[in-house]
Image (cartoon, grey):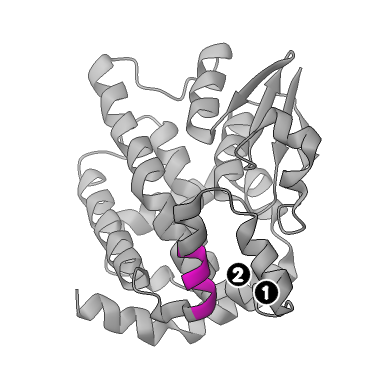
Amino acid sequence: MLELYHHSTSVCAAKVRLVLHEKQLEWKGNFVDILKGEQFDPAYLKLNPKAVVPTLIHDGKVIRESTVIDEYLDEAFPARPLRPDDAFGRAQMRLWTKLVDESLHICCAAITFALFHRHTVLKMAPAEIETYLQNTRDPVFRQRKRVWVHKGLEAPDVKDAIKFHDKLLTDMETALGESRWLCGDQYTLADVSLTPYVNRLEMLGLAAMWRDRPRVTEWFARIKARTNFQPAVIEWIPPQMASVMKANGSAQWPFFEQSLKAA
């Protein structure tokens, strides 16, 4: 039996749902409302001491970290494989998933907080804001989040995050000049890993970032046409939230455009 502890708009949770749907696996979902702090519930902390989602339970065994979960699922359920057959192909795939874990995720967080999450947080009373921030266990991430909440787009690392996304899209455009998918002609975990992050840009009204990158445009159209995309990503996003995210991001597109010109 597969159980997934997840949240609707978590990019990491979306990565795992994409694999579950792609492989047509049956699974039970346990929704963890991270906006209400349910990830700090003692029972959940026993499963995931980092207080993050997703967490997968397979026949009583706990697997954490979305990239690890995705590879685990591909090994445990080899039908409809999501990794290249050859060692070099798998190495190239892991360069993309490693990039997501080490760099893209924090850059996505910076932009998402600056454009969207901070507006929700700033509606809280000052003491509630401080409690919210203190609940972030990693002290480095806590400080970065504090700056994003209070300074928004003026946070010093937001422009760097914009530039990182721009370079990522350039690298994707180059890779897609060689093949249909990021690691050849097979849809792999590399494509799975990038999907929620490119979709997040579109949700924030920032799709213009790839308007001059036709291969990325075509890749994302293929992604959205796959049968796993709607049930794994879009159907979990509350329409009202999606509307606000796009409105907030679109209103700030001139800032992003200027930042890209200055890169």
Q: Is residue 129 above or below residue 15?
A: below
Residue appearing at x 29%, y 60% in the figure: 164
Residue appearing at x 60%, y 69% in the figure: 117
Q: Give how far across and how far down residue 159 sits, in percent.
A: 32, 72
Q: CA distance from mark 1 to mark 2?
A: 5 Å
Name which residue type carries label 1.
Answer: Thr
Q: Is residue 127 left or right of residue 191?
A: right
Q: Is residue 222 left or right of residue 57?
A: left
Residue beneath disc 2: 117
Q: Is residue 133 above or below residue 72?
A: below
Quadrant of the image occupied by residue 100: top left
Residue beneath disc 1: 120
Secondary structure state at the residue bearing disc 2: helix
Q: Give how far across and how far down residue 16 sits, in percent.
A: 59, 35
Q: Give how far across and how far down residue 47 sits, in percent.
A: 70, 29
Instruction: Give yes or no for contact between labels 1 and 2 (Cβ–Cβ under 8 Å).
Output: yes
**Near-viewer residue (194 or 212):** 194
